[in-house]
Each structure stands twice: as C-alpha cells, then as structure tokens.
Amino acid sequence: MLGWVDDIERATLDNSTFRTVLFTGQHTQLTVMTIHPGEEIGWETHEDRDQFLRLEQGRARVEFGQTGDSADETHEVEDDWAVIVPAGVWHNLVNIGDQDVKLYSLYSPPEHPGGTVHETKAEADAAEH
C-alpha cells in the first residue's frame, strides 16, 4: 500500500498495547495507545516535533508545562477530544477514569522506529533509555 487506509476508530479501540506504530512516513507517524486506569504516558517533551492526540475512549488529564519542573496547565478530556502538543512543550496524559484510555497519536516528524510495538509502559520506558 502506498499510504495508510483503515478504520482509525476500530484500530484504536481494538489496540491492547501501550503503544503500537501503525504507519511511519517521511514526515508523519501514526501510533495507537492504551493507557490503563491510573497509568500515564509520562512527563516528556519532543524538542523537534509536534504531536496530535485524539481520545476514542476514556477520561484523562492532560498536563502542559513550559519547563520539565511542573505543569503550568491541566485539562480534563474524554472521548472524541483532541490535543495538540507543539514541539518543546512538556506534557503528560494521565488516565483519571475507571476504563482504559484508547487514543491515537500523530507525530510530525516520526518519533519511534517504524513497526515499534511496546506491550507495556515499562517496555516503552526501557526502550527509550
């Protein structure tokens, strides 16, 4: 296939891994994620890439910070909400509900090696160190 075509809602809701890369292009990458109740993506920044996230299921708190020290803004989001994280902004997403958060994310440019699958957050953290 020359591009990526699929039912993004189904692909997101069917995902059971912490992170799976579905598509990697020259300028954009698509991942799906599952964040269990009480879990989080983790406080991070991407200096050279923007990120778009869309929740298909669940409730979360999104945190933004100007520095790595603390959050300057927090926002509660749920099904069908979208978040854009500009390059250089510290951020985190915390599942504050009682069901899994299911989301998809677009990175521009790509963040992870094509084909990456992280079954758990611990596996993702280990791969990033």
Image (spheres, rainbow, N blue to C red):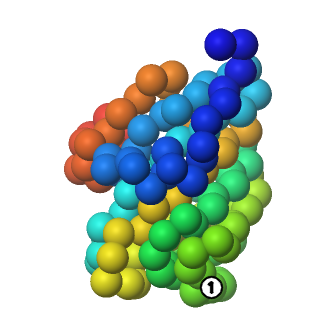
Q: Nearer the viewer, residue 74 or 79?
A: 79
* Left or right of 100 on screen, residue 103: right
Q: Position of residue 55 (x, y in %)?
A: 57, 66
For the image, the number of numbered tags is: 1
Q: For the residue carrying disc 1, how many other residues have a C-alpha within 10 Å: few (<14), some (14-19), or many (20+)?
A: few
* Left or right of 36 on screen, residue 113: right
In this orientation, does residue 47 appear? no
Q: Nearer the viewer, residue 7 or 125?
A: 7
Q: Position of residue 23 (x, y in %)?
A: 59, 28
Question: Which residue carries the number 1 mark?
Answer: 75
In terms of image quadrants, where is residue 82? bottom right
The kind of secondary structure element at disc 1 is strand
User: Is the residue 104 above or below the residue 127 in the image?
Assistant: below
In terms of image quadrants, where is residue 110? top right
User: Is the residue 6 above or below the residue 94 in the image?
Assistant: above
Quadrant containing the C terminus is top left
* Left or right of 27 on screen, residue 14: left
Q: Amino acid at mark 1?
A: His
Q: Nearer the viewer, residue 68 or 54?
A: 54
Residue at position x 51%, y 50% in the image: 10
Q: Position of residue 44 (x, y in %)?
A: 51, 58
